[in-house]
Amino acid sequence: MVLDNFRSVISKYDVIFFDAFGVLKTYNGLIPGIENTFTYLRERGKDFYVVTNDASRSPEQLAQSYVNLGVNDVTPDRIISSGMLAREYLDLKVRQGVVAYLGTENSAHYIETSDLKTLSIRQLDLNNVADINALVFLDDEGFDWNTDLTKTLNLLRKRNIPVIVANTDKTYPASRSRVSFAIGALAKMIEDTIGRQFIRFGKPDPQMFIFAYQHIKNYPNVSKKQILMVGDTLQTDILGGNKFGLDTALVLTGNTQAEDAEVRIRATGIIPTYICVSAVVE
Amino acid sequence: MVLDNFRSVISKYDVIFFDAFGVLKTYNGLIPGIENTFTYLRERGKDFYVVTNDASRSPEQLAQSYVNLGVNDVTPDRIISSGMLAREYLDLKVRQGVVAYLGTENSAHYIETSDLKTLSIRQLDLNNVADINALVFLDDEGFDWNTDLTKTLNLLRKRNIPVIVANTDKTYPASRSRVSFAIGALAKMIEDTIGRQFIRFGKPDPQMFIFAYQHIKNYPNVSKKQILMVGDTLQTDILGGNKFGLDTALVLTGNTQAEDAEVRIRATGIIPTYICVSAVVE
Amino acid sequence: MVLDNFRSVISKYDVIFFDAFGVLKTYNGLIPGIENTFTYLRERGKDFYVVTNDASRSPEQLAQSYVNLGVNDVTPDRIISSGMLAREYLDLKVRQGVVAYLGTENSAHYIETSDLKTLSIRQLDLNNVADINALVFLDDEGFDWNTDLTKTLNLLRKRNIPVIVANTDKTYPASRSRVSFAIGALAKMIEDTIGRQFIRFGKPDPQMFIFAYQHIKNYPNVSKKQILMVGDTLQTDILGGNKFGLDTALVLTGNTQAEDAEVRIRATGIIPTYICVSAVVE
Amino acid sequence: MVLDNFRSVISKYDVIFFDAFGVLKTYNGLIPGIENTFTYLRERGKDFYVVTNDASRSPEQLAQSYVNLGVNDVTPDRIISSGMLAREYLDLKVRQGVVAYLGTENSAHYIETSDLKTLSIRQLDLNNVADINALVFLDDEGFDWNTDLTKTLNLLRKRNIPVIVANTDKTYPASRSRVSFAIGALAKMIEDTIGRQFIRFGKPDPQMFIFAYQHIKNYPNVSKKQILMVGDTLQTDILGGNKFGLDTALVLTGNTQAEDAEVRIRATGIIPTYICVSAVVE
């Protein structure tokens, strides 16, 4: 496996899309040295965006989490989350009534509008569901799985409504040696059980990439050839980037370990343009 | 759709296999009139067995539940459960050490032997898993889903051990209008997430039918042509019975409603030999 | 099931996306009366596009097929095909070398460029595959399935290259009572067998809809709320349109028959904004 | 990875089940030295059976193929094939009329009885299908895939009949460096397309193992603990053997190569009792 130098790789592109978890940060803070990368991008005037499967918080709250870690470069306008797509869907297609959700109040706050109320499945009364017009899976926290997943299943048996999964990931790292289920896994269990087709947002889906593409400062005067997608996960970041027509760089600081990279690329047929040790510019 | 008379159907067979839920009983007691069926079977000297995807209790406890409902015919030796197959697997293939489980203490009691200890995932310490030799999914009750499903996922990341799913059903009816998740759905979520192949017991798997077949009083002097499988679910009872070479009767008192039966048979290609209103002999 | 009048439905939108097969035409010519729809669109100055999972021919050839049927409104610039996405992918991501393909010479002609040669799997020598940089599934015709699907499987065992499926449909109607396999079904068989992840283009994938969206004459000065997607298939046209944020109209002249529409909408959870008998303006 | 000595492994068991392809023979003849194993079994009076996913020929013809290679120990009564299960199914459940099939005439000859006629899909007239009572997938050879797979799909749209897949394998090795599609892959494509549930016979299904178990000379006086399953494929031989309660030995002369064995066992969670270089007794 030939490793590419990250500095020379990004020097060839005008815009960089970064995955967040496993690329810029982990469960216990920033990837060491990643500040250098932001400095490099700033000095060279390169544009960049964080493209993340995350519907647990608003872009403002996500940006604040970087400020809390000492990084001021990741401003809210540079964050593209799958939660933003869920919100756009509701704006375009649901518009009014009540949206039931699984997640924290924090996650729900972001999708609420003057015309569209939100209601936690926790608080849902199954005998009173006539005004529920959609269901959104936002976050794996904020509810009791035993009670509320069962309630969700029964809601869907009563109401044939659009179901939106705002983060398709199945797990996320919770510590050095442990993972947690992400909301995507819980949504999949209900989808399989009820046999209906949910509407899923998040990488590798191209809608995520077009959404990021349209947020680029110089859009539409940037060609796809000038953009690099940097990620740690073959099935989301690299597959999605490739399919959208972007060059892609796999980094080895997250889901894909150095010792597995070659085997996984061969097994999946998902081929990154580059492989780099990390997204740190040294 | 031509409906067959249940009395004339079972008169042609020497041995009857019954599914339990949706055929003999429901969430609120016996199917009305099912006592007549037991009387008929007793008077005609026909042999019968209850073949059930259930690992929540021992055959003795399951039999007691019929006694509590006023039926004395369903003795423990007439009950064939997927939990019995899980226990046989552990006897043959695991033999010693500790088996972790998801379920109630009641369900675990049944698989415990002098050489094989059981440990609830509730009580499992993830830092001390070296002596866990197998994991069994027994029941959807008896544990906290948020905490313990996550613990289970992390146990499997640490230990490559056999995983047994003792009931493959995805849901069960909890009341007239509500369903609950069965342990099979939770197991499937973890299987999909971890990407490993679990060992699953329960209809439609033929191992369930051969197990029942071998428990028949006159075995091996009964041909498969003399046995009828009676069930309410196409994908488990009817598919499994057909594949094992038995004639099959679909009844309309449980998962398959009269108005859906024809559509579902056409859609799935799972074709029962007979369709009857219920398993009640009138 | 309440049926909507197609004329009043499309009067509310500025841009109409039509699926081709089952909406504008069938195996034996135009949908009777569909000429009225084109007249209506022309007279009202409404913009429209044909958005089709088809990689068997170029937009020019597809447009010519409408001219041959007596319709001059469907000009090449109004045709958006999944084959165009495959071609864009090759332009962006493969660029040079040889692309092996399954399909007719006609289908291959369209993806060939000065830098990118095409080679039919028919003519491929499995001992000489070093310069094959990609594989594209274009059409179910033009090759011998016994020989060439097996050759394709072995090519992929030798070369870990991007594999593009330029039409994800599984079947298409071949006559009043018969269907044929589309290339998407053959591709899926090979993908399942080899265990790798192919790159698939075609509805319901949002990339197809964004591609169409960007081809609109007044783009980007058209909001998604002004666009209607008209299709005969829930899983491609309606699901994809909904997810992209468009209003959708299901018509009953193709894959979805009037007697099945309600059952299928309930079973799949894919809910069109409108249901119309056909796309004919009367 | 600790390798076990095959001689000491089989010395502990009274009955050995062998997979055929990749264990006893390959595309170009016997595994070198495998004659020693048969000599050993004969001298020690150990019972053995060949348990194979193969419906292309009768046990007599399969046995003859060993005689042709110079081995006389593999008599017809020692061969248990998935084709035998398909035949038993037809005997029990179809009984009369016409069975359509995909495969060679050779494969069909075996399932034909005085009451049950067979008809190749090649010769089927789609306008005359009223007496077709079942469809069987037997072999990947003997028909034209372009024409006859399409005909099969249309037959199933006209007739809701039981569909039997008599070999669930997806590929088989055709030479040192090439594989061919097995009939199981073609059947899966049609099953996915039509959305119905086919009846599948072959390892890892327990019905295959119980069928073999009941053919043992001393049955039922042999416990499962006295039987060893020897195979080259984790997903069929080892998974199926384990689930049925047998000890299992993985050999490295076929589908699982020495360099991949550990990774695959970890990835799949399918754990053989032993790993041996080959099934040759040295």
Image (spheres, coloured by chain):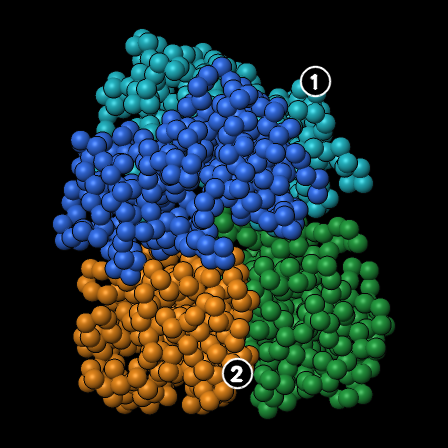
Chain colours: A cyan, B green, C blue, D orange
Q: Which residue is mark 1?
A: A114
Q: Chain of mark 2?
A: D
The residue lying toward the viewer, choosing from B199 and B21, is: B21
Q: In the image, what residue occupies the spot 18% across and 38% down?
A: C117
Residue at image position (29%, 61%) is C146
Question: Is disc 2 in contact with disc 1, using a CB cutoff of under 8 Å?
Answer: no
- In the depicted structure, whether residue A106 falls above or below residue D96: above
Picture layout, residue C100 above or below residue D48: above
| Disc 1: CA contacts within 10 A as few (<14), some (14-19) or many (>=20) | few
Residue closest to the far left = C128
Q: Position of residue B197 (x, y in %)?
A: 46, 57
Secondary element under disc 2, as helix, strand or loop, is loop
**Observer able to see residue A50:** no
User: What's under tag 1, amino acid-wise?
Assistant: Ser
Is D5 placed left or right of B101 in the picture? Answer: left
Chain letter for the residue marked with disc 1 in the picture? A
Give residue D96's mark.
2
Q: Mark 1: which secondary structure?
A: loop
At horizontal 60% and vertical 69% (from top left) the residue drawn is: B271
**Is B101 displayed left or right of D240 in the figure?**
right
Is the same chain shared between marks 2 and 1?
no
